[in-house]
Amino acid sequence: MIKGARPRAPVIDVSGKIDTSLPFTVEELLHNLATTRPVFHSEADFQHALAWELHVRKPAIGVRLERCAATRPRRVYVDLWAHGSAGSVAMELKYKTKRLTIVQDGEEFCLRSHQAQNFNRYDFWKDVQRLERVSVAGVVGYAIFLTNDASYWRTPVREVKTADAAFRIHEGRTISGSLQWSTKVDRGSRNATLVLRGEYWLRWADFSAIASRSNGLFRYLLVRVLGRASKEATAS
């Protein structure tokens, strides 16, 4: 983990309003979710559970899944959208797992191993790029990556020279500007260079520890995207 304290970011209400006096943050929302749902069957299960937790915490706001945001030149679909009188929050969620079979509170979970970590990292930054398009005045974006695969958060002991080096999301990185593969190989829909407007400092946090054996620790990366309305961008 990175030594030393970082400046405290403004607390952002899930309605999208920035206010340091608000009672909870998205981190606290995830912490509360982990107490009742420390593990999920799938990414869709994670999306639904977070949307329900958001509804329970703030019933007055509207929560939608897979909502279309009318952006130009083409429309963007967002995993989770919350709208209140003060503004909106757009969230993109990723849930990538390593193999784990457990029984939690009487419910069996059989998680499979998601391969292609390089593509998963690319897709996360594509989510951030997408959120930068929808994060205008009155809209704040969050990209969340939840996993029990330590290869995502573990800081390499030596310089990374893999083809996906630019897309790495391990602890302590600062990411900005153009992100591209270091080798010219056809990767289908993932060939395009990603261009980020903001600068993001990556900090991981524990979500849950549901088993003492391997792959039982879940951690998350939370990136806050302010987009075109501000030059500031903070990763939590």
Image (cartoon, grey):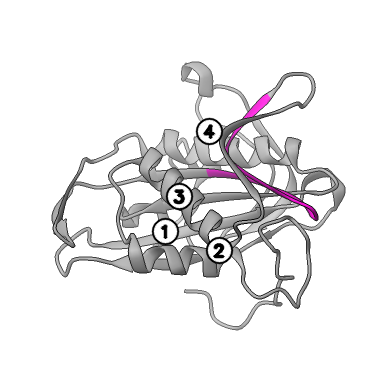
**Mark 2 and mark 1 residues within 8 Å of each other at the beta carbon:** no
Q: Report the residue marked by disc 2.
A: 57
Residue type marked 4: Ser
Q: Is residue 193 visible?
A: yes
Residue type marked 1: Trp
Q: Quadrant of the C terminus?
A: bottom right
| Mark 4 or 3, nearer chain start | 3
Q: Residue at x 48, y 63 (%)?
A: 30
The magenta segment: 76-92
Density class for disc 2 (Cα within 10 Å; few <14, some 14-19, many ≥20) is some
Q: Residue at x 60, y 55 (%)?
A: 223
Q: Residue at x 51, y 36 (%)?
A: 122
Q: Report the residue marked by disc 1.
A: 153
Question: In which quadrant of the rendered view does residue 69 lie?
Answer: top right
| Mark 1 or 3, nearer chain start | 1
Q: Is residue 206 magenta?
A: no
**Mark 2 and mark 3 residues within 8 Å of each other at the beta carbon:** no
Determine which of the numbered discs, if any, sits on residue 27 in the image.
none
- Give the CA separation, mark 2 to mark 1: 29 Å
Q: Report the residue marked by disc 3.
A: 160
Residue type marked 3: Val
